[in-house]
Image (cartoon, coloured by chain):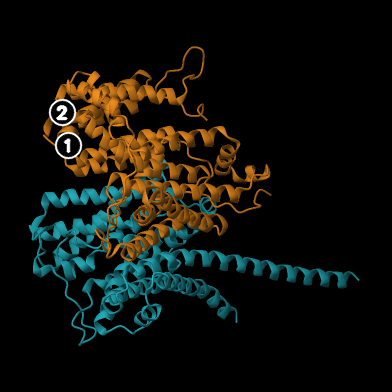
Amino acid sequence: MKRLDRLVTMLAAPVLALLMAGLISSVLLWVTGYSVGDFWSILLTWPQPRQLTNILNYGAILYLSGVAAAIGFKMNLFNIGVESQYRMGVFAAAAFAGTGWLSGWLNTVVAIVIAMLAGAGWAAIAALLRVFRGVSEVISTIMLNAIAGLLVGYFLRQIGVQSGNSTATKTIPESSWVGGITIFSDAGNQLLGLSLLAVVVGVAYWLVLGKTRFGFNLRATGMSETAAVASGVDVKKMIIVAMLLSGAVAGLIGMPTLFGDAHNYGSSFQTGIGFAGIAVALLGRNNPIGILFGALIFSYLHEQANNLNILAGISPEIVQVTQGVTVIAVVVAYELVRRIKVAREQAAVAVSLQADADVDEEVAA
Amino acid sequence: MSETAPTMAQRPAPTGGDQTPPRVRIAWIGVGVFVLLAGVRELTGSNDMLSTGSLRAALIAAIPIALAGLGGLWSERAGVVNIGLEGMMIMGTLGAGYFGYHGGVLAGIGGAVLFGALFGLLHAIVTVYVGVDHIVSGVAINIIAAGLAAFLAKVFFSGLPGGGPTQSPGLPHPGTLPLDFIADPAKTLEDKEWFLVSDVAGVVGAVTERISWLTVFALLLVAFTSWFLWHTAFGLRLRSVGESPSAAESLGVNVYLFKVVAVTVSGGLAGLGGAYLAMVASSGYQNGQTLGLGYIGLAAMIFGNWRPSGLLVAALLFGYTQSINLRGGSDSLHSLLLAIAIILVGLAAWNLRSKALKQAALFAAGGGLFLLWWATTESVSSKFTGMAPYVTTLLVLAFASQRLRMPAADGQVYRKGSAG
């Protein structure tokens, strides 16, 4: 019974939020003269195998981004800079792997490590500013986002090669590509090999956070810094480590696409994944399984947006509105659920205290 | 509050304490920098650096930054961090596009302010009444606004003559002020290329030549905010809510109400910045027009130490670096390196005089680097000027944060009745 109760309170907020987002999107469509029926029927049509593969691929990327954000959130650190850490990471990896100094899978592995280092290094700026100069990581990561975009653009112009009318890094030698995994034989597309990084990161996140002393310290610092200090946690060190880990995971976001699909880094690389990751982490309450659901839901919406455009002429941007509203709705819902829970606990305590008092009176009498 | 910040412009006078008001100090620093720039212009011969044209472009680039920054100021002075400025600005550009096309200039401005304020109100309700974290709400607002603007642009502008799914038809421009009788002689004087005189003429030209009344209005809003927040009872209460909400509440201030009003105004100001972008700085609404200007506005506010005069200076500075790009002024940019080097060396000397050796060494090293950069290169990549506002803000935060003072309860969620 108690377990069921917990499950209900846990799921109430996300379900409520998704309903709310659906409702607001419907109203918006209705007001602007689109067909609400079409919207829902397309959104709720079970995707084709090809689409399912896309959903898994994009979901994996979002999951990595979500975990990157969640590592920070667990410590009350707002790493708004996942976006730029991802860009720095994928650019560094692409630039290195493109040179072909190493061959085969060694090239791939080293490039992935470089991506993590680049992401962590970019996050380190914010971490050091926070720890040694007291600069809010929110502000510094926002500034670093803007700087990274321009910096990558600058480097791309320096080392990139022209292909058509866009510039990109040198194409990675074919021996270092990571092949796909066929899930549906009739889909015509494959799961990107490095999407499995999401599984690795997810398991590692769950293990480290839940089963290690470090994870305990991390969560303790997030819940109460003073309590953590009192129990001997070096908060400064924790901030730096958490931020670096967050940046390292962010560096991985671009890997599936880079080694499995694009094979070079150019201006066509998708933007906004970092912010979507923040949304996904919030939706999933920083829980490894929760983030998975969040990532799949966002990825599902993202994929169905194409069909909205093709089949019903509804502009796909509506999905972005739905996603944004989901984020606001979910945090509002969590807050409301939390308050209801607190009120119920207080009521329960009051009842049991009253019962105790009654017993005491009887004993006295 | 002016007493709390130690100043670098004045060494303590024998009478004790620093008597120069900050505004006067900023003005003097401004004059000094200007003379320096004029000198560098004279020295390097990059005459476009302080020409009417580039200063005018700088002003036009600065106003949206200043308006966004002003929005941030209103919000943060009431204790609510507003990362959503960017989104509110986006809504402003959309509002200006829709209402401006259908109803003219005033309707466009009103619509932009309305759209921005609505998103401000959303941010206010979510952060103040529900008590959601300010950053989370702001991030969500930016996602929603970008999507909603792109979605509605398609609905509003598709099929209109001159419009399309991603842009509005040409919008009417707010009128210009008839100041040609000043601008024309200034132009003549500027063309003489006399040291300082022509430079001053360039400035005069920049603020008189075809200046939009919306520009003047925006500048007045900065002055108005300065007066309203620091010299009225309402402003005092608003700031008290951002400094110590529990104290404010115990004195009978309706904390929630003040926060909500402040954040809504904040959204309206960011929306006005959007209107300026769509109607003055360009000829209509376009998807993705704001290009992160909301964030630069936020940076300007921090750089300006949460004060109107400071944020205006920062906005002008950032606007200058942004606009000089668009004019293809790699020549001017290159000369700017020399100016920065001189300023840094000057700061080093200053710190040396007050025996702050560490800072002096830092500034000297920075100055040396810029000097080296200037001497060894011919031009500067435009990407670096794009970065300038963000890098400066980071540097200021990193090395001068003890001079900065943000509202004490900024970013904290306040629950009514927690005053006890």
Query: Against A232, is B378 above or below?
Result: above
Q: Nearer the viewer, residue B89 or B247?
A: B89
The label number, if any, that marks residue B46 in the structure image: 2
Residue B416 lies left or right of residue A67; in this view the side is right
Q: Secondary structure at mark 1?
A: loop
Check if mark 1's residue and mark 2's residue have beta carbons within 8 Å. Answer: yes
Image quadrant in which you'd find residue B141: bottom left
Give neighbour class at mark 1: few <14, some 14-19, many 20+ (Cα, 10 Å).
some
> Which residue: 18% across, 61% down?
A110
Q: How many labels were placed on the picture?
A: 2
**Are the residues under marks 1 and 2 on the same chain?**
yes
Query: Where is mark 1, residue-wise?
Result: B329
Q: Secondary structure at mark 2?
A: loop
Residue B409 lies left or right of residue A244; in this view the side is right
- x and y percentages locating residue A308 in the rendered image: 31, 76
The label number, if any, that marks residue B350 in the structure image: none
Q: Nearer the viewer, residue B77 or B156?
A: B156
Query: Against B346, is A133 above or below?
Result: below
> Which residue: 78% across, 69% down?
A354
- Disc 2: host chain: B
- Disc 1: host chain: B
The residues bearing labels 1 and 2 have C-alpha atoms spaced at a distance of: 9 Å
- x and y percentages locating residue B135 in the rendered image: 44, 54
> Which residue: 48% across, 34% down?
B226
Whether residue A208 can be seen here? no
Image quadrant in which you'd find residue A353: bottom right
Residue A14 lies left or right of residue B300; in this view the side is right
Q: Which chain is orange?
A: B
The amino acid marked with disc number 2 is Ser
Q: Which chain is cyan?
A: A
